[in-house]
Image: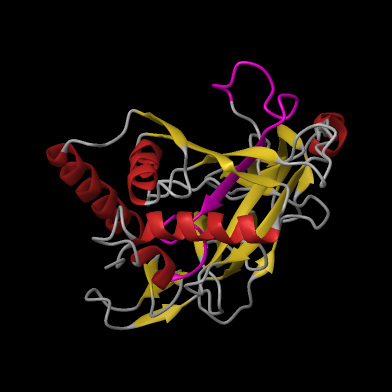
Amino acid sequence: MGVGKRWLAAYLPVSIDRKNEILLTPGSYDIESISHIDEATNQIYFIASPQNTNQRYLYRTRLDGKGKAERITPVGLEGTHSYVISPNGKLAQHVFTNYQTPPVQEWISLPDHKPINAQESIATRMKPVAKSNVSFFKVTTEDGVTVDGWMAKPTNFDSTKKYPIVFYVYGEPASSTVNDVFSIGQNRLFQGDMANAGYLYVALDNRGTPNLKGAAWRKSIYRQIGRINVRDQAMAAKKLFSQHAYIDTSRVAVWGWSGGGSTTLHLLFQYPEIYKTGISVAAVVTSCFTTIFTRNVIWGYRRKIGRIL
């Protein structure tokens, strides 16, 4: 895997110095990871989601670069899929989740993606949970940056009323918060139920988070942690306020853990006119540790995807 001018893609090196390469996944989309290389059938399996960067699906294409990417994950199970493929490429453990479906797994054959045991298939075993109060959205800030987000509204929501809002943040290169998985909209540290308690609960993914939005999106945070990620969060919150009169802008809270704890502190001190209170858990605040942490994150990406910088 490597980063081209714009997208994270799969390449086949033709020479040791990598000056000659065959692009295996052309197109305006990122791939997340390579799942399996099947030399016997001349195929490479990878995870991507060209249409929705908050979801994940299994694709394959030819190793010689002459094929077109083919989606292997069946249409109809929209959300996040992960796979552990056997060495011979004929079997896989398949796990599926989305914001309304707890993680459920099955064993499948490849490349037909058929369950080995129909009675233990995902279609048979999954138990969706209705979450009518949870929705995904996009918002474009005054800086022209479009960020993804999700919102969990209070139980018995009434758009004519005012509600306090709590933002859950991370905002750094190690993780994203806006993914189509079952855990969104939930706060395991809240004693009780936030929706029943009358809170709006929101998460936003700023530039620099590892979303499948291209090289420029991910690289933008290099040497800018605490700056552009914090501004994106604040400006997206500001835009959200202007769009929804039911948000009580006098009662705005933010919280996060580790990198999210650092982001919380930055938001509280840089934008006190927006954020009124916050909880910063295990924030990365020591300069020595911050330097080491940031270096490890950046170099971790370099080891993972090749040419990120």
Report the front residue among 282 and 182: 282
Q: Is residue 67 shown left or right of residue 283?
A: right
Question: Which image quadrant for residue 186?
Answer: top right
Q: Is residue 72 above or below residue 51?
A: above
- Residue 38 visible in the shown view: no
Q: Magenta stretch: residue 212 in it? A: yes
Quadrant including the C terminus: bottom left
Where the N terminus falls, by quadrant? bottom left
Q: Position of residue 136 (x, y in %)?
A: 70, 53
Q: Is residue 166 magenta?
A: no
Q: Which region of the structure is painted magenta?
A: 188-214
Please give left or right for residue 93 compared with residue 261 in the image. right
Quadrant in the picture for residue 261: top left
**Residue closest to the far left:** 288
Q: Position of residue 197 (x, y in %)?
A: 71, 24
Q: Please indicate whether residue 73 sits to the left or right of residue 37 in the image.
A: right
The residue at 47%/70% (across/down) is: 214
Looking at the picture, tell me which residue is in the foreground, 246 or 279.
246
Pick whichever, 216 or 303, lies toward us: 216
The reply to whether residue 187 is visible in this rendering is yes
Main secondary structure type of the part rendered in magenta: loop
Against 196, residue 302 (above or below) is below
Q: Is residue 128 above or below residue 33?
A: above
Quadrant in the picture for residue 83: top right
